[in-house]
Structures are given as structure tokens and as C-alpha cells.
Amino acid sequence: MTPGREDDALSWDGDDDPTLSVGAPAERPEEPDPEPDPEPDLETDAPPARLPEGFTPVGRGSEDYREPSKPPIAGRDAVVGDDDEPAPLGNVELVSLGVIGGFSLLYAVGWLIGGLRLQGTAEFLVAPLAYQVSLWLAVLAPLAWFVTVLLLTRERPVWVRFAWLIGGIVLLVPWPFIMVGAIGQ
């Protein structure tokens, strides 16, 4: 243990090595400049390198990078990409979609349980095949509503998507489960 260092437990041997510093570059001994080459400097005269499609530059100097065919990027917070792409989902929207998808799944289970409990009574009024078809359509309705709204409102504002999803939650309440199922008994 070296005297005078309070944070020895938080350091490793070799931390004092100047070549590992993250801040300013390490000082190098000055070398005499070589004679200028008659050939052009490839780093400054060459056209800018192109990144493959879908890649984004990162790291030091990436904010200055621009595609040769695109205008320069105006600052670090500029988004590089096509305007045709929809914006990625935000955290709140993603969590809200998960909650509403969970409600849709629970509604499907509610329709199944409630419909199976009513099966004996309903078959006096409706043919068994008709009852089975309507039961499975009722079970699949909340899931179909959720998926359909997601697919049809991709290009719409977020509030439109959530208005339709909440409308489906209100419209597709599993009444057989509520009236006859575990709650109604």
C-alpha cells in the first residue's frame, strides 16, 4: 500500500500509466518533419468514406460525419435517417401497449371461461355448432382487435392508436365472465 493515496482500494496497478489517460493525448517527443511528398495526402484529399446502409457513425468526430449526398448534420442531436420511417416507440407508449395487450389477453381468457360456463344453458337456445363458432369468435375478438388496431394505425398519431385500443377495451368486456363467472356467483 502506497502512502498518501486514499483510494487505493479503487485503483489497479498501472493506473498511473500516462498512455492510458482518457483526457488529453499523451505527449510524444517531437520528430523533425519529413520532406513533403509530391503525392497528395490521402486523408484530406480523398472523398469521405461511405458507411454501409443502416450504419451510423459513433465516437469522437462522428458529429462532423456526413454522407456525401446528404447535407451536413446540424449538431449532435440531429437525427440521421429517412423521413419516411415512422418514429420508434417511446418508453411510455411501449409499456402502455404492453398493458393494453395484457388486457386483451385477459379478456380472451374471460370470454373463454364465461362462454364455457354458459355452454349448457345456451345450447337449449342455439345449435351446438353455432354456439362453438360464436364462442371462438368471441374469444379471438379482443386479440384480433388489438392486432388490427396496431397494424392499421402505424402511420397515425399516437393518440389515435390509443383511442381505438381503449375503445376496444370498453367494447369487448367479457360480460359472460362478469355475470356468470367467478364474479357473478
Image: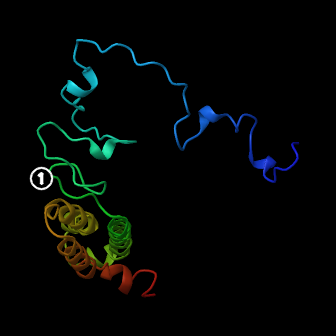
Whole-percent x and y of residue 169? 28, 77
* x, y percent for residue 90: 32, 64
Residue 164 picture location, percent across and down: 19, 75
Q: Where is residue 185 in the image (x, y as percent from the top left)?
A: 46, 87
Quadrant of residue 150 within the rendered picture:
bottom left
What type is the residue that disc 1 sits on? Asp
Q: Image check: 106 left or right of 12?
A: left
Measured along the vertical axis of the image, is residue 87 above or below residue 120? Answer: above
- Mark 1 falls on what kind of element? loop
Q: How crowded is mark 1: few (under 14 residues within 10 Å), some or many (20 or more)?
A: few
Is 34 drawn above or below residue 173 in the view shown? above
Relative to the observer, which residue lies in front, 102 or 85? 85
Q: How was the colour assigned to the protein in this rendering?
A: rainbow
Residue in the image at 45% along x and 18% along y: 32
> What residue appears at the point 20 percent right and 25 percent down from the top-left corner?
45
Write down the residue under mark 1.
Answer: 84
Give the residue at x 78% y 52%: 7
On the rendered image, what quadrant is the N terminus found in?
Answer: top right
Residue found 37% across the figure and 65% down from its top: 91
Q: 110 or 44: which is nearer to us? A: 44
Left or right of 168? Residue 1 is right
Occupied quadrant, residue 167:
bottom left
Relative to the observer, which residue lies in front, 100 or 88? 88
Q: Is residue 15 or residue 99 the one in the foreground?
A: 15
In the displayed structure image, the side of residue 76 where residue 60 appears, left or right: right
